[in-house]
Each structure stands twice: as structure tokens, then as C-alpha cells.
Amino acid sequence: MEKVYSERISNINKFFLFISIILFSLTLGVYLSKQESTGFFIFGNLGKVKFSLYDSNGYRIEPSKYTPAYDMWLYLIHIICGLSFVEVAFTPIGILITPFVYFVLTKKIFNSYLLAFIGSFYIISEIAQTGWYNTFAYAWVRPVYLVFILLFINILNKEIKPEHVLVLFLMFWGATFTHYTVPVWVITFIVVLYCISKLEGGIYSKRLSLIIVLLVVSYISINKVFYDVFIPSLTKMVNESGYFDAISVFFMKLKSYASGHNIISEKYVYYPSRGIYSTVRLMLNFLFLIPILLSLPPIIKKFINILNRKDNTSNFNVSIYIYCAFLITIIVQAFVYGNVTGISNQFILFMGPIIMLIALNLFGSKKIRSIFLVALLVLSTTTLSLSLSYEDEYLRYSSIEPSGIWLLTAGDHQKHTHVEDKPVVLSTISYYYYVNFIGIDYNKSIRLSYFTSDTYEKLVSHKYSGLNKLWDYVIIDKFSYDYHVSGERIKYFEPLSRYSVEIYTNSNLNKVYDDSIVLIFKT
């Protein structure tokens, strides 16, 4: 693509830039691994692989119906590298793969090693803060999306060849079986390219129409998340009043981030903020949004002229095609997650530097671009530094493991009254994932009762005396006690320390375990 930034970088400096990215990624990945920084969902997938191996004496893998390819990746790392399943969870792979592909894509679009370096530095800092530096699904599927963009740049510039289509479908199917979001990004990307091309006279539309049909049909045919999660959630949102108001939740989060303070919107419901860190993260989002908003008028004007057949100038170049596809993907991503868990800014934080730079090319001078690039480096460095300064030791697997082992082995499993010989536990979903992963070694598991407004009130008030009919155990980890409680659908509640007197004086709760990290009460 065209060169938009002039630079004079010698080959030796290019080499050092590239090596510095690798060393920075590796150092940060090792540090995060030692800190046991990860999202808890990975233990759900590891647990499925581990259980199927134990259940079949090591002869068979029964992966998740939603992410079978991802589960197989975890299994292969476990076998080939000889790592335990816990070690697999903290192996720094994502932070090594993604920055490299990000570097190549940024260099391809802007023909600038300096911008490629800045983009890679940003994505390293972003990965480190969002918990997929390791073997989480994003570590495998998001680089595939970047490769997909690279492939389509070549397709738009040249004739589509059979090998291009074959690689495209292999990547798409691999992504579909690994995680459900990136295939939606891919479909959105191609549909937008098709629509723009159709408006301009069909320069690319014939090449893309068949690909779109095949991708959409294959996605809705093989992706069970679409039917099991998205459609039911959408139906409930439409039919059930008060089921989930994604927009109001989104704006309450914005308010808490902007103010740097925690906010209580209704009884017990809580919107946590990490002070200055949350505020700076919000500023980073606006850094990407401002150029987007400023770029909309010329793009909209161009579309209007095309629709009115008043624009006889040359067609949009490839970078503008890609840019428009990115903008629509931001909206689609927000809607999809808004339907299921809340409006999401994941895509703009992932592709932000590239989107911002394309937008700045439409209206910005060299000075304006330089200001935005400096701001990007300052904000990303600040958020990374602040993120690393927070030590969430209460959320580490090794901190949770002792209480999990006690619950599964020393806990009173024989006297509870619930079905399937599984105790019902009121806890955060992260604790549930950790304990059921641990329980595979003991052939035991627990059933989760989510924190909701109703269950939270029953726990912290003395009005309800039948707690033993609801739960066998109540788990209060130190993070939930001091900071906030994580409930269903990414909903948060006040820290339980605000109701410590009510909890400790509740005659229906008997403390049976305390290791300073986790409290366990028997009902």
C-alpha cells in the first residue's frame, strides 16, 4: 500500500526495533506468568480436556462443543511441551505471536517500520492488561484475524486465486472452532467490502458475493453459540422487561471510569473503578474515537455523492475499504456483546492504532498525526504501568487452590440435601471455575449459585432464614470482600466488607474455613 509517512531508518535500526519487540514481549510474558495473571475462563476449557483424559484413562479427548479446536490446542501444548495443565494456563504464547503479526500488518498498511513498532508496542501493553498473554483463546484466534486482513489486502489488490480462497476458508473454520467472535468480525469485514464495492460499481462485488454466502452458511451451520447463547439472549432482551439493559449499564460504567470513583446505581449493584487507571483507559478509548468522528464527514459525503451519481472521481482506495469495514465491526461487536454480556469496546481497543492512523490520513496534518502518536505511547505506557502496579494476589490460582482442596476433600459432602451429590455453592464464577478444575483430581465438583441482587440481599440481611435450602456453602474470597463481587452477566455488587457485621452475626452461617484469602461458611 502507499507510503504515507516518510522515515529514514537504517537496516540495523530496523533489526533492533524488531528484536526489542521480541525481548519486551518475552520479558513481560514471563513476568505475567510468574504473577499467575489470567482470565479464569481458561480453567473451564482446561478442565474439560483434563476430565476427558481422566475419564478415558488418557485415550480420548472430548472437547467443548463451542470451542473444540481451542481445547485441542491446549491438549497439544500439554502433551508436546510436557507441561501440567496449570502450567499450560500460564504459558506466554499470545504475547509473543500477536505483536509479530500486528507488526507485519501495520507495516503492510502504512509502509512504515516506525508505525509498525508503535503499533506492536501498543498491542503488547493491551494484551498484558486484558489477560490473554497466555494460551487463552484470543491468543490463537486474534492473530488469525490479522492474517485474514493481510490476505484480503492482497485479494483487493490482485485477482482472487483458488489458493487464496482455500486459505481463507481454512482460517475461518479454524477461527470458528476456536472462538466465536472473530468469525463475526470476518463476516462483517467482507460484507462491508461487498456493499462498498457494489455502490462503486461492483469492482470487487463479484469476487466477494460467493465468499460471503459460503462463510455465513458455514458459520450458522457449525457455530452452536449462535443458537445456544446469542438467540436466547436476544429473545429474552426483547420479550422480558428488565432482563438486561446494556445501554444503561454501559453509561454507568463510563461514569465510574470518568470519575475514577465507584458508583452504586441501585441497591447492592456496583460499578467499580480503579481510580486513575480506569480514567486513563477511558482516555485511550477517546483517543481512538476522536479521529473516527472527525473522519466521518468526508466519508459520508463521498457515499452521498456516489449514491447521487455525482462522484466521478476515482474509487475508494484499499485503506478506506478496510477502514469502513473496521468502523462497522466496532458497531457489530458492541451489539453482539451488548446482547450477551454488555456493550463491548474490545474491537476498538484491539485495532485502535490502525483505525486511528487511517482516519488521521483523511484529514490530519503530519503535526496532528505526531501528536496522536505521542499521546498513544504515553497513554499505553501509563495504563500498562498502572496495571502492573496492581497485585491481585487474591485472584491467583495458587491463592484459591488451598480452599478449593479443603472444600472438595474436608467439606461435609455427605450431609447436604441437594441432588447429584454436588454441593451448591454461592460464590463468584471465577471461584467456581477454579474449584471444579481442582475437583477433577478428586472426582468431585460443585454447583454454582450466582450472585444476583436477590441472592446478595439474602446473604447480607437477616430477613431470610432458609439459607440451607438455597446453598450448602457460601464462599467469600478476599477480593469480593475488599473490592467488589462479580455476579452473573458481568454484573458487580458492593464489596461484602460493607456488610461484615450482618454476615458474621447471621445465625444461619457458620464459618468453617479461613486462610486469610478465602472464607467458607456452612449454612
Image (cartoon, rainbow, N blue to C red):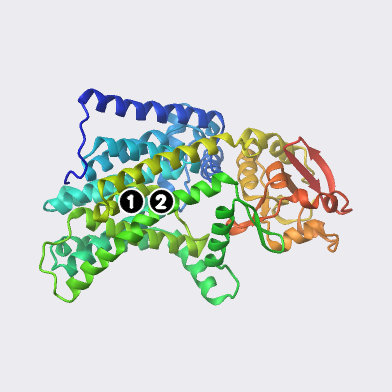
**Which residue sits at x=78%, y=60%?**
458
Q: Which mark is residue 469?
A: none
Mark 2 neighbour density, 10 Å: few (under 14) some (14–19) many (20 or more): some
Mark 1 neighbour density, 10 Å: few (under 14) some (14–19) many (20 or more): many
The answer to which quarter of the image holds residue 345 is: bottom left
In this view, 206 is above or below 124: below
Q: Extreme top residue here?
A: 12
Which one is in front, 338 or 138?
A: 338
For label 2, the residue is 287
Q: Extreme front residue here?
A: 367
Which one is in front, 114 or 523?
A: 114
Q: Which mark is residue 356?
A: 1
**Which residue sits at x=31%, y=48%?**
368
Q: How many marks?
A: 2
Is any part of residue 26 visible from this angle?
yes
Q: Amino acid at mark 1?
A: Met
Cα distance, mark 1 to mark 2?
8 Å
Residue 376 at x, y percent in the picture: 39, 43
Drawn side of residue 354 relative to residue 379, left or right: left
The answer to which quarter of the image holds residue 223 is: bottom left
Element type at marker 2? helix
Query: Mark 1 touching mark 2, by CB under 8 A?
Result: yes
Element type at marker 1? helix
Point out the tag, 1 or 2, that comes first from the N-terminus.
2
Drawn side of residue 291 relative to residue 308, left or right: right
Which one is in front, 51 or 248?
A: 248
Residue 392 at x, y percent in the picture: 62, 38
Drawn side of residue 391 relative to residue 223, left or right: right
Is any part of residue 180 visible from this angle?
no
Q: Amino acid at mark 2?
A: Leu
